[in-house]
Amino acid sequence: MQSEELINFYSVIIGTELLNGRRKDAHFSFLNQELLKRGWRHKASFIIEDDPSLMENIYNLIKADKYSVMFSYGGIGSTPDDLTRQVAAKVFTNGEMQFQQEAKKLIEEQFKEEAYPHRINMSYLPINAKLLDNVVNNVPGFYLENRFFFTPGFPSMSQAMVMQALDTYYAKNSVIKYRLSLTATCGESTLIDIMKKVDSNVELSSLPKFVDGVRKTVISLNSVDKNKVESNFSMFKEYLDKNQIEYVLKDISI
């Protein structure tokens, strides 16, 4: 498994009906909340239509990141527009697919004679796929390399699969990141010269806001190196003190 400090989480939410407004997405907020609870963060999230070439491009983009972990939602059913299994095989297993015997058995047990001729195809998966439990109807999701997870588009099914995947492989980020934040009573432009001096291994966040008509800027620094956070943060405090700009500090948080 990749170094915890470097893991990048992606989500791919497939569904034309989300983009045309027929349904509302519930996947991003759930996954994002679960990642944050465990000390992880999203690198990127994509909502795309059921277009195999677009799906392939997005999967390849994520695959190119050697530190990626992906949750893909939708397109693993048995209808002609369910293309995720085939595209996943093309990108991640050189097009090789097979009937996954455990998945095949689950589908046969769930649907009996109605498993054929169509539902059984939901067990035709990229080679070496492992399974995610479906708490609703026993038709499993699947995953590859312990890092590329494919779930149904129905939140009632996918959410339990996400929990299973995270609890099994990414239960908690043990890498502690230290954060210091302040809210300064000035605009962002006032602090740009200081922002440019922040070390490259310290993450800088600058958020402008208006409070009762007063322009303010929230500055937040975080890194695994506590000393670096403190030394870089001191540059902002010294500048604000020198220029008599009011600010409010927040405590260190992880």
Image (cartoon, rainbow, N blue to C red):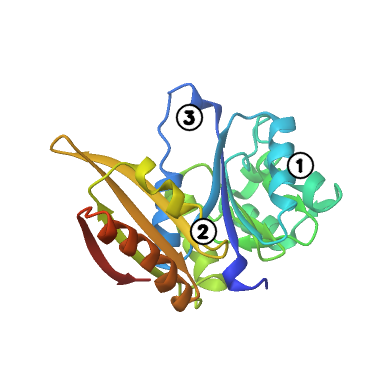
Percent position of residue 79, x then y: 64, 32
Marks 2/3 in contact by CB < 8 Å: the verdict is: no
Residue 161, numbered circle: 2
The Cα–Cα distance between marks 2 and 3, rounded to whole angstroms, is 21 Å
Please identify the quarter of the rendering in which residue 103 is found: bottom right
Name the residue located 61 percent from the left edge and 66 percent from the top edge.
6
Mark number for residue 86?
1
Q: The residue under label 1 is which amino acid type?
A: Gln
- Residue 172 seen in render: no
Q: Residues within 10 Å of mark 1 (few under 14, many from 20)?
A: many
Q: Nearer the viewer, residue 116 or 215?
A: 215
Q: Is residue 125 left or right of residue 41?
A: right
Q: Is residue 48 above or below residue 155?
A: above
Q: Residue at x 46, y 56 (%)?
A: 204
Percent across and percent down for residue 44 are 55, 47
How far separated are the C-alphas under marks 1 and 2?
20 Å
The residue positioned farthest toward the front in the image shown:
242
Q: Which residue is mark 3?
A: 18
Q: For marks 2 and 3, give the one nearer the viewer.
A: 3
First in sequence: mark 2 or mark 3? 3
Can residue 36 be seen by looking at this rendering? yes
- Local packing at callout 3 (Cα closer than 10 Å; few below 14, some 14-19, many 20+) is some
Using a 10 Å C-alpha cutoff, classify the residue at mark 2 as few (fewer than 14 neighbours), some (14 to 19) or many (20 or more).
many
Corner quadrant of residue 51: top right
Q: Are marks 3 and 1 in contact (CB under 8 Å)?
A: no
User: Is 208 left, or right, of 172 in this rendering?
Assistant: left
Residue at image location 43% in from the left, 47% down from the top: 192
Task: Label 2: state its secondary structure.
Answer: helix
Task: Mark 3 vs mark 1: give the one in front.
Answer: 3
What amino acid is labelled 2 in the image? Met
Dot 3 or dot 1: first in sequence order is 3
